[in-house]
Image (spheres, grey):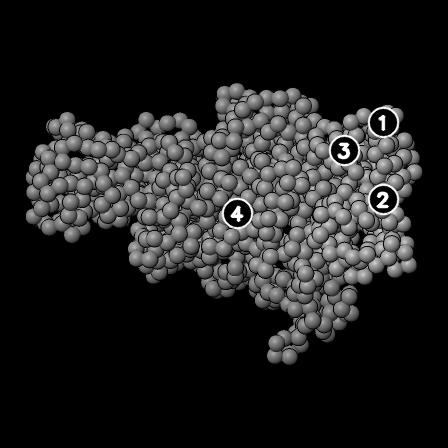
Amino acid sequence: MTTERNGEARVPAETGPAGRAGAAGGSTGTGAGAGAGPRTLAEELRSRGDGELAELLRARPDLLSPVPGDLTQLATRAVNRASVARALEQLDRFAVQTAEALAVAPDPCAYDTLLTLMAGEDREETVAAELPRAVTTLRTRALLWGGGDRLHLVRTARELLAPAATGPAAPSTGLGPAVSEATAGMSPGRLQQILATAGLPTTHDSVTAVEALTALFTDRERMAGLLGEAPPEALRVLDRLVWGPPYGQVPADPGPAVRWLVARGLLLPTAPGTVVLPREVALHLRGGRAHRIPEPLPPPVESAAQYSPRSVDSAGAGQAFTAIGTVDDLLHAWETAGPAVLRAGGVSIRDLKRTAAALDTDEATAVFWIELAYAAGLLASDGTTDERFVPTPAYDDWRARPAQERWAALVAAWLPATRTAGVVGGHDAKGRALTVLGPGLDRSQAPEMRHRTLDLLATLPPGAAPRPESVLARLRWERGVASAAGGGAGAGTVTGGFAPGTGTGAGAGAGYGGGTGPGYGDGSRDRAVHGAPSGRAATAGARRGGAADGWRTAGTAPVSARGLSSAEELRTRLTEWTLREAELLGVTGRGALSAHGRVLLGLPAATDGTDTTDGTDTTDTGGADGPGRRTAPPGTSASGTSASGTSASGTASPGTAASGTTASGAAPGAPAASAGPRPAGAFAPRSVTEIAACAARAAEVLAPLLPEPLDHVLLQADLTAVAPGPLERPLAETLDVLAEIESKGGATVYRFTPDSVRRALDSGRTAEDLHAFLTEHSRTPVPQPLSYLIDDVARRHGHLRVGAASAYVRCEDDGMLAEILADKRSEGLRLRRLAPTVLAAELDPSALLTRLREMGYAPAAESAEGDVLITRPGVHRTPPRTPPAPVAEGLPVPDDTLLTATVRAVRAGDRAASGEPGPAGGAGAPPRAPGGLPRSTPGDTLAALQAAALTGSPVWIGCITAEGAADRRLIAPVRVESGVVTAYDHTAEEVRTYPLHRITGVAEPSGGEI
C-alpha cells in the first residue's frame, strides 16, 4: 500500500506522448484530455505558486515538521494516512460530503459526474453553486488534484472514506460496494446465471460479465425497464436499503421478493445470510445522489430573543461587576483559611462545598470562579509543608485597580485558558477523579471553541440572543459532523423474509485508521485498510462522530446519549460551557453579546442595528434578520473572498490557484465558487498580548456602565445596614469585620450581631471607634438598639482574661469566676481556682477562649505582661507565581515568515533534485562572504539577528560548526528564541537552525550580495 501511495506522489499516471506533453504544458484545469492536467500530485504541486504552497502548509502545518526536502517529499507526506486523517478532521460538512462523493466515484472523476453525485440529476442550484468552493477547499489542502475532468481524490482519503467489498457501508453516504467489488470471488457460473436472468447475453469470462452488469445498472432506461418488472414487495425491500445501511440479513429460505432481486443481481450476497445493495443500483434509485441530504450551507445561527442593546449592555455590566465581587470574595476568604492541597493535587470535595456555600452559589459555578482566579494568576499553592491554596501577591495589585481593569484581567485569562472547569467531577483515562485545581483539566480545544462560539454570537444583530441549538448545529457543521437529518436512515422491520441487519458491518461507519491527530479517541492504529474495525481496535476508543456521524463511527465505538463520540461530545459541552461562562463574566447579557464583548473579540462596539463585523455581512440565512439574508462569518472578507483564499468569482486570489488552473478545479462552464463559510481548521489563536489589548479596550467601553462605589450605608432599627450599591474598599473591609453579610444582590444587607461586634473589638477597635465609624458613614441616624448592642458587648468584652498556664482565667470579679465554676457546661474545662480572681485550666488558651465564648461570655486573650492581645486573622500570600500557561494542541500555526522561508527551501530542494540551476542569475553558485569571519559582541549579535528577523533582511554570520571549523553563512533569520536562530540559509538553500553560542558575529551584506 505504501508503494502505491508513493507512486501517486512520484510516478506519472500516463507515460505516453500525450501524457508527457501534458506534463510539459502544465496544468490547465480544463481537463480536456488525458494529458491536459497534471499526472501526479507532486507534478500539480510544482505547478502551484508560492502563495498556494504557503496556503497548503498553513492549512496542514503537520507537513512542516520537519521541513520537506523537495516537492516530491511534500507530496509523499501529504498522502500519509495520519496526515490525511488529520486534514479530513478540519473540513466543513459540505467539503466532507464532497470528499465522500469522490470516494465512491470512478477515479479519475469528471466534474459533471461529481456534480451529479452531489446535486442529483436535477442539479439542485444551491449545491451546484457551493460545489466549486468545496472542490477548492480539497484542492488547497492537497486532498484533491487533477484537472476538471480528471479529479483525483488522494488514495489515502479514498481508502478512509470508501466502502469495502465486505466491510461497512460508506460512512454517511450509506452506499455499499460497487458491483465489481461485491462480486469478487463469485463463481463464473453464478455470474452467467445473473446475466441471463437479467435479460443480458452471457459472456465468456467473469470480467466482461461484471462489466455488462455494471453497464446495465448505470443505464437509466434499461434499469427503469428492469425495475418496472419487479414485484411491489421487491421494490419495498429496495426502498428500505436505498439510503443505507445497504446490508440485510436473509434467512436460509428467503421470500420471493428477495429471491427475485438476488437472481438479477440487484442484491448480491456478501456472506452466508447477508446481502448487499450494489452501489450502482443505489445511485440509480437515489436519482444519482451520493447523500440523502446534502448540506452545502452552514445552518443559520437563529435568534431566540431580541433585546435592546442598552439593556444587554446593562445586564452584561451587572454580571461583570458581580464576577469581580465574587472572585474578590473567594480570594478574601482563602487568604485567611485556604483549603489544603490534596496529595494528588487539587481541592477536596468538602472544601469545595464549603467555598460554594460561602459564595452563595452551586458547586459547578464555584469551580469556575476558582479556576478563573487560578488562570489569572491570583491564586496558587503556597508550597509550604502544610501546603494550601492562598492568593498570590498579584491579588493585592489586582484588588487595588479600578473595577473595569479587574474585569479585563479576568476575561484576558479566560479566553486563552485551556484548563476547563466543566470537566471537574469526571474521571481521566485511568479512572482517577478530576478535582478543582488538580491535574488533568486541560482541554486544548477550549480556546478555539470559546473564540468561535463568541464569533458566531457576533454575527447576530446587537441585542439578539441566539438559540443554543443553532450555535451547536453550526459548529458541528464546521467540524464536518453530520446533522441528525443528514445521516443514513435506519431501516425497520421488513416482511418477506428479509430484514436490514448488522451482518458484517451494516450501518457501521468507517473510522479513520492510523490517525494521531486531535479527536481520535485512543488513536489506535489497529484498523483494516478500509477502516473496518478488527481485533482490539473493534472495541477501542471512539472516533470523532457518532450515530448521526456515521463516517467517523468505528464499529462498537462508544457514543454519548446525544449520539456523539467522546471528542464531539466534549466540543459540544465546551460550547455550552462557553455560553454559560460568558454570561457569568458579563461578556454576554441576557444571552446576547454585549458591546464590550464585541470589543473583546476585536470588533467595533455597536450599540444599535448597524453592521458590527468590521466590513462583513452580519446575518445568516433564516437568521435573526429574516430569511434570504446571508452571513459572512468572521474570517470571510466583504469582497467575497473566503478564509481559504478563494475569491467569490471562482478565480484565485493572489497566491491561491495553480498556474492555468481555476480555483475551483471545475470543468469549463462550471459555476464560479461563492464566498464560503469559515474553514474549520482556520482558527489562528491570538497571542496573550493581543487578547490583553482587546480586553483593555473592552474595559474602556465597560467603565461607564459600572456603578460608582459609595461611601455610605443605611442603618435600620432591626440591627441591619443596607448598602445600596458597591462600597468603597475601606468601608467594605470595615463592615466585613463589624457585621455579617446577610444577602447580596443589587443591594447588600449586613447584620450586626454580638459575635460580629466582638470580632471588631478583638481587632483592636474600641466602642467609641465603632460609634464614630457608623455615625460618619450612615445616611440615617444610628438606631438606638445598635448603640446598645455595641455598648453592651464592649462592657463585657475583656472582663475575663485568658492566658497561658497551660491556660488560666483571670477576672477582678470573683463572683463571675464562681459562676463559671458552678456552670455544668464548664465540667469539660477541668477548671480549678488558684486564687480568688484566677482559675487554671488544662486546655490551651485558644481552645479555652472558644469554649467560654460558646458559654456566652466575652473573654479576651492577654499577654504574659497582662496586656490585651489584639487578634486579627492572619493573611497569607504565596511567593510570586506565574499564571498557568495554556496547553496548545498539535503544532503551532506557522507565521508568514516561516512559510515563506519553507517554500523557498522546498523550491530550492526541488531544483537541486531535478538538476535545475538556481534562480540567481542562472549560476546557482552560493554567495560568498567578503573578508574574514564576522565578529561582534554577544549583545550586538543578538540585537542584529532580532532586527533582521523583524525586517526579513539577510545577514552574514560567522559560526563554528559541530566539527569545530569556522564558516560564514548568508542567512535570513525567521525567529530568534530559546537560544536558537531559525533562518533560511541562502548558502545551503534550506531552512536551518544555529545555536547562538556558536555564532561569532553578524555583518550586513553589500547591495550586490543580496
Residue ID at (65%, 37%): 360
- Estimate the spatial distance between the alpha carbons at disc 3 and disc 4, rounded to whole Å: 36 Å
- Estimate the spatial distance between the alpha carbons at disc 4 and disc 1, rounded to whole Å: 48 Å
Q: Which residue is mark 3?
A: 751
Sequence-first tag of 3 and 4: 4
Residue 339 lies, in percent from the top left, at 66, 52
Q: Would residue 693 be seen by someone viewing this image from the given angle? A: no
Q: Which residue is mark 1?
A: 783
- Which mark identifies residue 425? 4
Residue ID at (39%, 52%): 541
Quadrant for the N terminus in the image:
bottom left
- Estimate the spatial distance between the alpha carbons at disc 4 and disc 2, rounded to whole Å: 46 Å
Q: Nearer the viewer, residue 875 or 40?
A: 875
Q: Are there few (<14), some (14-19), or many (20+) residues within 10 Å of tag 4?
A: some
Could you tell me how many numbered marks the image carries?
A: 4
Name which residue type carries label 3. Arg
Q: Which residue is mark 2?
A: 797
In the image, residue 528 above or below residue 507 = below
- Which mark identifies residue 360? none
In the image, residue 874 above or below residue 134 = below
